[in-house]
Amino acid sequence: DAKTTQPPSMDCAEGRAANLPCNHSTISGNEYVYWYRQIHSQGPQYIIHGLKNNETNEMASLIITEDRKSSTLILPHATLRDTAVYYCMWNNNAGNMLTFGGGTRLMVKP
Amino acid sequence: EAEVAQSPRYKITEKSQAVAFWCDPISGHATLYWYRQILGQGPELLVQFQDESVVDDSQLPKDRFSAERLKGVDSTLKIQPAELGDSAMYLCASSLEGTVNSPLHFGNGTRLTVT
């Protein structure tokens, strides 16, 4: 199984950076790390993905360790609307399956 | 931005009845996925299509669940007969290619309650 490990919950003050860690120690060399988030009662929303290099887009930054066994999603200036469950995951190369774990529930507080 | 459309948004049915969900992926997306999400858990993949062909349905309970994507565009997921344990959110997603470098785009799901 394409298993990830994330803390079940985190808090962050509004306006501060939120750093969400993920362990994916069994990822293979050509499999991308993906991050999604899910706001209550909506479908998951794609945030960012990467292979080896750090990535940045208008939503977030993704830092992947050199050994690719873990990554960190950074929301540089968290807002109350960033309160959501954040999922780290990757494709299982064997069947192109995308496996979600339990995710991290991020609570952004005023 | 183009979206994945799903209907109905909510469905309440009695156990032993049949129920069906519909999904229209983003235009041009070859790969379509159905997920089930039980409250408080992450989504679980049920079936994956590449065009009209099933790529993976190893997690689909085939005694009661069926899925089709006849023309390689929209898709239907059916449950017959529904059981109490099927109460969940059913999510559809699509991606351009279904490769390791192709993000998924999700619809807002159908919330099923079986009574």
Image: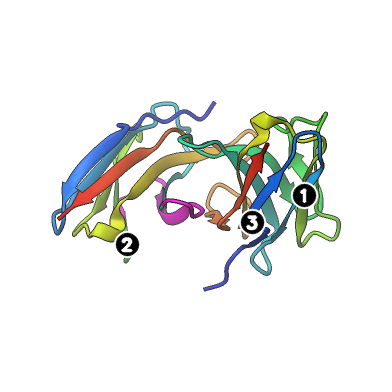
Which label is found at residue A99? none
**Does dot 3 land on a helix, a strand or a loop?**
loop
- Foreground residue, A63 or A18? A18
- Viewer-proximal residue among A7 and B112: B112
Identify the colour scheme used. rainbow
Instruction: Give the mark nearest the N terminus, 3 or 1.
Output: 1
The Cα atoms of the two marked residues, 3 and 1, are separated by 26 Å
Q: Is residue A35 left or right of residue A97?
A: left
Q: Chain of mark 2?
A: A
Which mark lies nearer to you, 2 or 1? 1
- Three-letter code, disc 3: Glu
- Name the residue rendered at 75%, 30% in the picture: B61
The span picked out in magenta is: A40-55
Front: mark 2 or 3: 2
Q: Is residue B75 magenta?
A: no
Pointer 3 chain: B
Q: Residues within 10 Å of mark 3 (few under 14, many from 20)?
A: some
Across and down, in percent, residue B67 comes to: 79, 45
Residue B2 picture quarter:
bottom right
Label 2 – label 3 distance at C-alpha: 23 Å
Residue linked to disc 1: B20
* Res. B28 image quadrant: bottom right
Asked whether the beta carbons under mark 3 and mark 1 sit within 8 Å of each other, the answer is no
